[in-house]
Amino acid sequence: MGVGYSDDFMGPLTMSPNLIRERGRQLEVITNVRMPRGSTPEALREKIAKRIRGWAATSHVTVEIDHEQGNWMARDPKGAWLSTLLNIFGDTTGLEAKPVPTAGSTTAKLLPNAINFGPAMPGKKYTAHNANEYKEVSDLDLDMQMFTEMLVRIGNLDRMQ
């Protein structure tokens, strides 16, 4: 669509059509847009709308655009929450703990200073959010240990960020 850009840590802007269906005499396309740092929701909405309206005009198609766009979320890697969570991951797994970008964080965005903490095991295939979603029992055990430790350590921090 000519609106792409990328962030060094968060990666590229992605747009994934999740639902395409006929609604009466209209075609409805619902798309998940993952917006990294480097733009604002307003600017991205306008760029996308301009491209779609341009295509519609040359194709002689009537379009209706309803674009709701959340803002990107990034936290200070030196902040108290993130360093605590990274320490928990490293202490529990014995693996290198470093922040990774994620397309998730729906609930974390609703809380001030929150961080999306859903440990995925490095080197293992991501198996969540699909028709055959599963987690290995050994990884679930580690997750439970990390989440329990997280409640204790985060609960004892003097400040959130």
Image (cartoon, rainbow, N blue to C red):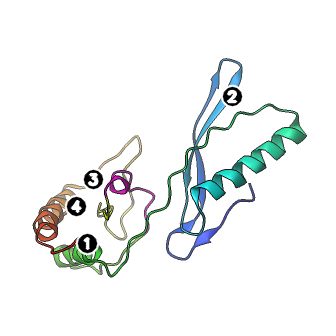
Q: Return the disc, 4 or 1, that comes first in the chain's sequence.
A: 1
User: What element does badge 2 sit on?
Assistant: strand
Residue that label 4 marks: 139
User: What element does badge 1 sit on?
Assistant: helix
Q: Return the disc, 2 or 1, that comes first in the chain's sequence.
A: 2
Work out how far the residue at label 2 is from the one at label 1, CA to CA, in angstroms.
44 Å
Residue that label 2 marks: 27
Type of amino acid at the residue the image marks with label 2: Leu
Can you give x and y, in whole percent of width and height, for residue 1 in the image? 74, 54
Residue that label 3 marks: 135
Residue that label 1 marks: 81
Work out how far the residue at label 3 is from the one at label 4, CA to CA, in angstroms.
7 Å
User: What element does badge 4 sit on?
Assistant: helix
Q: Is residue 74 left or right of residue 107?
A: right
Q: Main secondary structure of the magenta part?
A: loop
Disc number lying in front (2 or 1):
1
Type of amino acid at the residue the image marks with label 1: Trp
User: What element does badge 3 sit on?
Assistant: loop
Type of amino acid at the residue the image marks with label 4: Asp
Type of amino acid at the residue the image marks with label 3: Lys
Q: Are marks 3 and 4 in contact (CB under 8 Å)?
A: yes
Question: Image point 65% across, 58% down: which residue?
Answer: 43
Disc number lying in front (2 or 3):
2
Q: Return the disc, 2 or 3, that comes first in the chain's sequence.
A: 2
